[in-house]
Image (spheres, rainbow, N blue to C red):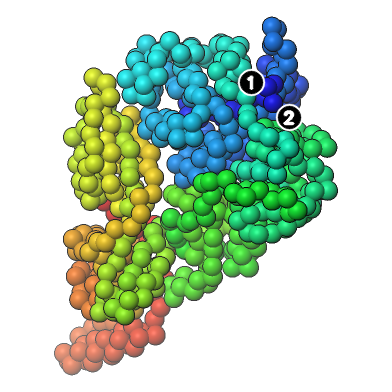
Amino acid sequence: MKRIRNFSIIAHIDHGKSTLADRLLEKTGALSPRELKEQVLDTMDLEREKGITIKAQTVRLRYQSKSQGEYFLNLIDTPGHVDFSYEVSRSLAACEGALLVIDSSQGIEAQTLANTYLAIENNLAIIPIVNKIDLSQANPELTLEQLENIIGIKKEEAILASAKKGTGVDDVFKRIITCIPPPQGDPEAPLKALLFDSWFDSYRGVVILVRVFDGVVRIGAQIELMANRTFHEVEEVGFLTPKPKTVDRLSAGEVGYMIAGIKGLSHARVGDTITEKNRPTTLALPGFKETKSMVFCGMFPAGESSVQNLRKALEKLRLNDFSFQYEPENSSALGLGFRCGFLGLLHQEIIQERLEREFDLSLITTAPSVSFRVTRNDGKVLEVHNPSQLPSANEIKKIEEPVIEALILTPNKYLGAVLKLLESRRGEQKKMEYVSSQRIFLTYILPLNEIVFDFYNNLKSISQGYASMDYEFGGYREAPLVKLDILINREAVDAFSLVIHKDKAYLIGRALVGKLRKLIPRQQFEVSLQAVLGKRVIAKETIKSYRKDVLAKLYGGDYTRKMKLLEKQKTGKKRMKKVGRVEIPQEAFLALLKIK
């Protein structure tokens, strides 16, 4: 165990985490020059395009120190977005140290702080690395000052590096060996291992990544997954280099993978504790919790895609991502589809893009919403994921909405605009502090419902891209919420229903029917659009009908002939309105996302 070091790399998006991992792999010869490519550990096209890590990876490196001999370094990569913060916390729980990467051209950002706090909570040794010092706009001196003033780490402890050029990477290895403590554990004790990641293999079943804290796991051992109380026999153990390499056993302090004939990811949940069936440990490792969907939207097939193809695609995708859920949904406007739940907005975007790319589907996606907790007059508590499931207003005692604690870092010249945006989204200021002469750190309580549309884009545009945000879930809070329905020809279209704050209902209702009037094409009959709260119409628009000139064939004659033809046309229009169906284009469903 004295020769093992378990560490992770944490950073804000696009600060050079994956590039540093590439250099560590290159320096230790984990891959041949022919196998090396940029962002080796980012295996998905989406990860490369967006510059973020979606699926965490693990790799065991053999490092030869000139003075101290050989060391085994277990690099446990972490996902790079706030939506996956639970997975980040479990990956950090499997480590003794963390490399904190900061971009010297951008300085400390909100997610840098959030990840640092997570590392401190897990009692990790932190090695700060000021990256990208080779860039012309780099300002390492300012970044070092921020490191000392904001986080409280002495600037002398930081390593100045350029992961792209390989500068400072040798210093990183030396600091990993000297600063990160070796793992502690008793190989003779009952098995206690943390499951910190898993994925599905079509041929072998579920592959799980584990960090062994106590005991030994061998091939043929009977193990128990403590959260599920399920038992399995270990078929294979090994570690990733990053290619899989089988071994006879994994002992205390080691990180590796395990295959045990587990059929579905629902049995191998991140954060679970693995122990022996015959000699179980008394206490499970702390920190396990069920992943919970925070953002919901409806997905419906469009064009030539069928609901059967969408169902098959969702089933396949869920084999490798247990954190999103789906259930069948029938919409009067869009037909058969699925109501899907996601960890956050980025997670929703990734799943939607994967469905369209990997399975060649064309989708209509409804506006994202959050889950509400509704207490009825009889005391029964419901969890509502879809506005159409909300009981009528006279049955509701109270509605609670999810809130988040947002951490926002902004340059002081954009402070006024950022505060105005936060106040317009019903934000409550918790804390505001200057972390340097130029930057301000804001802590706000915000309703999640207010940030699911365009909050992040607005924050970036008003700060010219300089403000950054991170958040964590803060529970539920009672609020005066109402259900806004949109009626088209007096029929409610469930895909347009919204649960919103009552003070904003009139403005949003008016904006939405105004937008729909422009997007829904004219019909042969007049179409009325209404925004409704309960039974009260708060906004109305009318789409005028096409009108054929029935008088064109007349060239004179009595006035009553004209009136007779116009009355006949009027009767026909009324009859058409009863049986006519309004075709709603896909752009109309996206209108919700674009309302200012």
366 and 78: which one is in front?
78
Q: Secondary structure at mark 1?
A: helix
User: What's the distance in space between the residues labelled 2 and 1, CA to CA?
Assistant: 12 Å
Q: Is residue 30 visible?
A: yes
Task: Give the quadrant of residue 436.
Answer: top left
Is residue 462 or residue 559 the one in the foreground?
462
Name the residue that disc number 1 marks.
24
Amino acid type indicated by mark 2: Thr
Is 213 on the left-hand or right-hand side of 247?
A: left
Query: In this figure, which residue is indicated by the disc labeled 2?
Result: 241
Q: Earlier in the sequence, mark 2 or mark 1?
A: 1
The secondary structure type at the circle numbered 2 is: loop
Q: Residues within 10 Å of mark 2 (few under 14, many from 20)?
A: some
Q: Residue at x 31, y 84 (%)?
A: 573
What is the three-letter code of the residue carrying label 1? Leu
Is residue 37 visible in this depiction of the protein?
no
Give the residue displayed 37% in from the left and 68% down from the top: 387
Give me the residue at 46% from left, 14% from top.
158
- Which residue does the image show at 73% across and 57% down from the upper left? 231
Residue 226, percent from left and from top: 63, 54
Q: Is residue 382 above or below residue 211?
A: below
